Every structure is written in structure tokens, then in C-alpha cells.
Amino acid sequence: MNLKPETLSTIENLIPRYPQKRSALMMVLHEVQADQGHISNEAVEWVARKLDLQPINVLEVVTFFPSYRQEKLGRSWVRLCRTLSCGLMGAYTTGEVLEKELGCKMGHTTEDGSITLEYSECLAACGTGPVALVDEDLFENLTPDKLGPVIAEIKNRAAGGVPSPTKG
Amino acid sequence: MPVTETRLLLKYADEPDYTPGIDSYLMVGGYEMLKKAVGMKPEEIRNEVKGSGLRGRGGAGFPCGVKWDLVDRKSGKPIYLICNCDESEPGTFKDRQLVHKDPHQLIEGMMISAFANDVKLAFIYIREEMPKGAKILSAAIDEARARGFVGANICGSSYSCELIVHRGAGAYICGEETGLIESLEGKRAYPRIKPPYFPAVLGLYNCPTIVNNVETLCNIVHILRMGVVEYNKIGRPNNTGTRLWCVSGHVQRPGYFEVAGITMGQLLYDLCGGPRPGRKFKAIVPGGGSMKILRYDEKFKGKKPNGEAYEYGVDDIPLDFDGVAAAGSMSGSGGMMVMDDSVDILEALANLTQFYAHESCGQCTPCREGSQWARKITARMCTGNGQPGDLDTLYDMAGNIGGRTVCPMGFSTTWPVQSYIDKFREEIVAKARENRCGMPREARLIQK
């Protein structure tokens, strides 16, 4: 496991916060995924040793929660909400435009590993739907006619550019 | 006279110069109630909260004071406090505002609640999809710790309490308190069975645990500030305080509104600007995706205090726990989704059944299998492959989920399915038939 030194020190600080080591599991997995882009079998075993667990205890959590990924995510991870409020405002049409403009099918990662595009369930920003979470940033009011800026930003990040600040 | 908002929790949140930083909060009198609280007896605070009648804002509306009363204080085990910020109910985005815009109000509410219940370690469980919120909270906790509002010797007293931000990982079921607790213990979020696992007795690490919603905990600050008598003047008896309503879908001005003592019509027209031009309201989901749908042209029967019966419509429903319950639904988490006459109600149902099929945790067979049945049947009806009897199968199946599972999420599949069919049966049948016999239209609200 080649985790960055800062990831390791964050993990070391996370564990003693909890009365029981196992409670740190989800937070440790977030750190590992942020560092590696996914959670590999090697990472599962490493985390298990770190928290005095069996690998299966870690794996069953990884496979239960939708945010943990066993396959590498794209450099830019785009999650477009499809649940009712966003759906009513045209999320599926937005999804079609994004697929076309980004050259990536829903539920897939581009071959060059630059973009992961997915539908997600409710992102809790229903009043400004359709919304999408691009990495850590929320983009709102993504009606099909207003996608220029978000597409440009996703392409910027996919190319390894510095994320532009957003208000989300 | 158009109604206005009654902003208590969101009083400063949208002010132009107000930031999530501690200086903004201190400027408007922040943490004064925590200072006052640590000088009180814990049971005095608990009595205040009980006297306020504050009802939980997460969905069920269970009185907060009663929840606190149920805590086992004699076990000798530590008591934990968890703030449920896993806001995932479709249509709800109120906790997002409170956390992103005024995090210190939540921290103060939590620390007062922690002191009142002799809690030494508290958690904020925030959903993974709010990464910014988690960062804002962590930064705010560091600020508060530096000023002595969190950590050792709070406000110079002998009381100490730590506060930890814990992130979820995209599972709706963690909004259910025992699922949340399992997840916080580092396990799959399979809800626990009650009895015996009432969190107040056997919660986190099998210790007494309080799980409260973000909005509920923010209210604690205001109950202490205003006192029970003043606080109880807001809203109606048994529905005290303000409510944060999140309106989404087909209104002119969707958004979040903090109100008290108004009707659904006042919210929809005065605050949200009514339907879009040329459109009419068709249906309202009042309190988040799980709650029963209301037809906009529906009529309800009420009784005046003198016993005289009268009829009222959706616009007249009082916007609080009891008002919406009297109309046969629930105010839930305050996530109101509005649909106008452009909506195909069958597709709307198919959209929601897809949500619940995705979010069923899989522990109980009726919910795991039933939610998939609901998704498949509604989807095939949308795409021209409906079968005769589909609707009856769906209705019957849905009735066998709710109440037959470990957690209340079974009802989240049951209620939409049954209420949509109860209220729009003819339209659903006609749509399914049309899709089957004519050229099936392209479904717009489900994933193909």
C-alpha cells in the first residue's frame, strides 16, 4: 500500500477519536479512496490490519455503501441526481446531454480514466434541481439549456486542471 | 395580505454578510445560551425542552423531550448523542441550509443537549454527498474548541464533551437511527430490531444513545433563549415552533421556507408563487418521497370545535404535523414535492419506486424483494409492457411490506405505491394501457 504520508497521518489521527477502533472504518475508507481513487483488495486487507478486523468485516462495508468503489473512479466524478424533484425538472434530458458532450455513458468511466458519469439518488438540493455533484462541488439548476459552464468545468478537471471554486 | 416567513433558525443564514465562521455567530449572540446552560441543572434544561413540546423534525415527529426522558440514566454506561444529518429523504434539503450556512447554531444546540443529558462524546453523522458540509462542520468545531465551547471545560465549567464529524457513504438507510448506529460502529447499516434495541437503552456500543435531527437540535438554542412560554406561542398547540419546508418541483419559486401557523395554500401561492404559467397543480407529496401523495383537487372532512362538519381542500391544510396528518398523509421531513398537470403520475411513481429499490438495505425479505417488484412492475407499465392485473399485484404486494420489516422503511415503499394507486388509479390504468396499445412514449422520469 502506497498511501501518501498525509493520508497516513490523517488516518492515525482518526482512529483514536473513537471509543472503539472499528468505528473509524468508514472514515478510514474515505481517506483510502480519496488517496487511491478506489478501494482495492490490498487496501481492504491493509485497513483490516489497521483496525484489528478480518478483511471480510471491511469488505462487507465497502460493498454495502454506494460511495465506496472497488473500481477506479475517473479523475472527475460526476453524479447527476435523478430522483423525483430533479427528474421533474428534466434530469434525464440533462443526463443525455452530458453523456453526449462528455463522451461517457451513464454508469461508466471513460477509457482514459478521466471521467466517471453516473445517475445518483437524491442529493438533498431539490429546490434547485436538476443538480449534480462534481467531485466535492454541487452544481445547481442544470436544466438542459444551461449546461455550458458545468461541462467546461468537468472537462477542465478531467484534463487534470485545477478545480474552479464554486459556491456549492 | 400575503404571509411571510417566521425565521428563527434561518434568521441570519441568508444575510449578505453572515458567514459560517464563529465571529458571525458570536456577533448575533451566539453561544450565550450554552454559557447559560452550563450554569443550569441538566434536568432544568430537559424540563424546558419537554415543556416546549418540541417534536422531532426528522420525519416521525416524536416529542424530543419524551425521547430524552426515555434515556436510561441508571445503567452506569456512557450516554451518547448523535446528530442525524444523513438528510436523504427525496425532496428534503433543510439540514443542508442549517449546516452550510449556520454550523455554530447546530454545535451550540448539540452542546446544550449534550450537557442536559450528561453526554461526554457526541457525533454528527453527515451524508457523504455533503463533503463541503462535513468540512464546514469540522472547521466550525475547531473554532468552537479554541473558544472553549467544545472539548474540555466548556465555558469554564467542569463539564467536558467532545464532538466528532462522521461521514456516511451514500446509504439512505442510515437516516434510520439504528441503521445509523450500526454504520457508526463500522458495520453494514442494517437496522436493529426494537425491542430490545431502543437507542435510549441499547444504542451505540449498546449504551444509551440519543439520535436527533439537525433541525431539532438547532431548536434547542431557541427554546432556551425564548423560554417555554414565548416559544410555545409560535405555531399551534402540539405543533410548536417553526417548521422548515422545502418546496421543489413545479412551482414558480421553489426553495426553503421557515414558517409557522400557515396553510399549504399560503406556502404554495404566497411564498412559492403558485404554479408555472399556464399550468395547474395536480398533486402534492407533502413531507418527503415516502409520504402519501395528495391530489390537489382532493377534499377532506373536518370538524369545527362546536362539532359542525365542514369540507376543506389541499390549500387549507394547516402546515404542521397534525394538519397534514388529518389530511391522511404526514409532514415527515418537510420535503414538499409539487407536480403540475404536465406530469405523468405513473412515471412519477416509477421514479420513486426506483429510489426505494436502490435504497432498500436488503436485510428484510419483504422490503428487499418487494421494492424490486415495485420498481420492475412500474417500469414495465411505463414502457408499454404492463400486464393485466399489474396494478392489483402491485397494490397487494405493497401492503405486505410496511409493518413486516425490522425498520419503518418498509412503509416508504408501501405508502407511495398504495396512495398513488388509491388516488390516481384511473389515470395510471389509462396510461399503462395507452403505453401498451399505442406507440409507447419515451418515459422521462425513469432510467431505461
Image (cartoon, coloured by chain):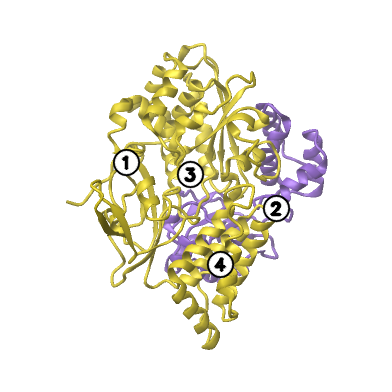
Chain colours: A purple, B yellow
Q: In the orientation shown, which residue stands out farthest toward the bottom?
A: B438
Depth order, front residue of B320/A104: B320
Circle 4 chain: B
User: In the image, what residue type sits under mark 3?
Assistant: Ala
- For label 3, the SS is loop
Disc 3 residue crowd, few under 14, some 14–19, many 20+, Cα 10 Å: few
Write down the residue under mark 2: A69
Depth order, front residue of B153/B192: B192
Q: Residue at x 60, y 35 (%)?
A: B198
Write down the residue under mark 3: B60
User: In the image, what residue type sits under mark 1?
Assistant: Pro
Q: Tell which circle, 3 or 1, labels the residue nearer the N-terminal end.
A: 1
Q: Nearer the viewer, mark 2 or mark 4?
A: 4
- For label 2, the SS is loop
Q: Quadrant of the C terminus of chain B?
A: bottom right
Q: Is residue B182 visible?
A: yes
Write down the residue under mark 1: B16
Disc 4 residue crowd, few under 14, some 14–19, many 20+, Cα 10 Å: some
Q: Position of residue B93 (x, y in %)?
A: 45, 49
Alpha carbon of mark 3 to alpha carbon of mark 1: how far?
34 Å
Q: Tell which circle, 4 or 1, labels the residue nearer the N-terminal end.
A: 1
Q: Nearer the viewer, mark 2 or mark 1?
A: 2
- Residue B33 horizontal side relative to residue B403, left or right: left
Q: Nearer the viewer, mark 4 or mark 3?
A: 4
